Amino acid sequence: MADVEKRKQKLDRMIEAVAKEQAKLLLAEREEQRKRRRAELKQREADRRADAHRKIELGGLVIAAGVDEWNEAEIVGALLAVSEQLAQQPQGRDRLRRKGLDHLEAREAARKAAKQ
């Protein structure tokens, strides 16, 4: 009988050890899930901030172009018209880019001159 009792005790200890390991594993899995969730939330926040920053920059370009007094439909209409023209003349983008750079550089130079 003593042998059976020892075996039961040994089995109980093994079951307890397995239960402890399972608990540790469960805690580790939960921590890993929390870390992944935090990383996802952090990435979403970074994406949201980048999107907001991009929109602010685009709004600044509307102001830089001097069309901030236009209503939204006029701005979108103008962009669509230019987009349609560029679809037919892709080389026009280079011309527009140069014109835009010249305008932005002139604005920056005027801004610097006004500070002095």
Image: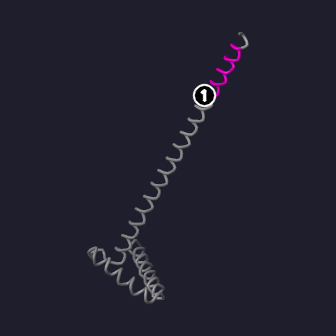
The crowding category of the residue bearing disc 1, from other C-alpha atoms within 10 Å (few below 14, some 14 to 19, many at least 20), is: few
Image spot of residue 16 (x, y percent): 62, 24
Q: In which quarter of the image is residue 74?
A: bottom left
User: Measured along the vertical axis of the image, is residue 19 above or below residue 57?
Assistant: above
Residue 85 appears at what percent x and percent y? 39, 87
Q: What's the residue type where badge 1 is placed?
A: Ala
Q: In this view, does 85 lie above or below 19?
A: below
Describe residue 8's horizontal placement relative to residue 40 as left or right.
right
Please give the name of the residue rendered at 60% of the width and 28% of the height, measured from the top-left corner: 19
Residue 8 is left or right of residue 70, and the answer is right
Q: Residue 57: where, in percent of width, then height?
A: 41, 68
The part of the image, by quadrant, that contains residue 12 is: top right
Residue located beneath label 1 in the image: 19
**Extreme right residue here?**
3
Picture residue at 42% right of the left edge, 74% below the top: 112
**So how many labels did they put on this image?**
1
- The answer to if 88 sits in the magenta stretch is no
What range of the chain is rendered magenta?
A: 4-19
Residue 6 magenta: yes
Most foreground residue, 50 or 66: 50
Task: Give above or below for 11 relative to 87.
Answer: above
Q: In this view, does 30 lie to the left or right of 78?
A: right
Residue 28, percent from left and from top? 58, 37
The quarter in which the N terminus is drawn is top right
Residue at 50% across, 47% down: 37
Please tell me whether the stretch drawn in magenta is mainly helix, strand or loop: helix
Element at label 1:
helix
User: Outermost residue, top direction?
Assistant: 1
User: Which residue occupies the foreground of this view, 33 or 41?
Assistant: 33
Question: Which of these two is toward me, 108 or 83?
Answer: 83
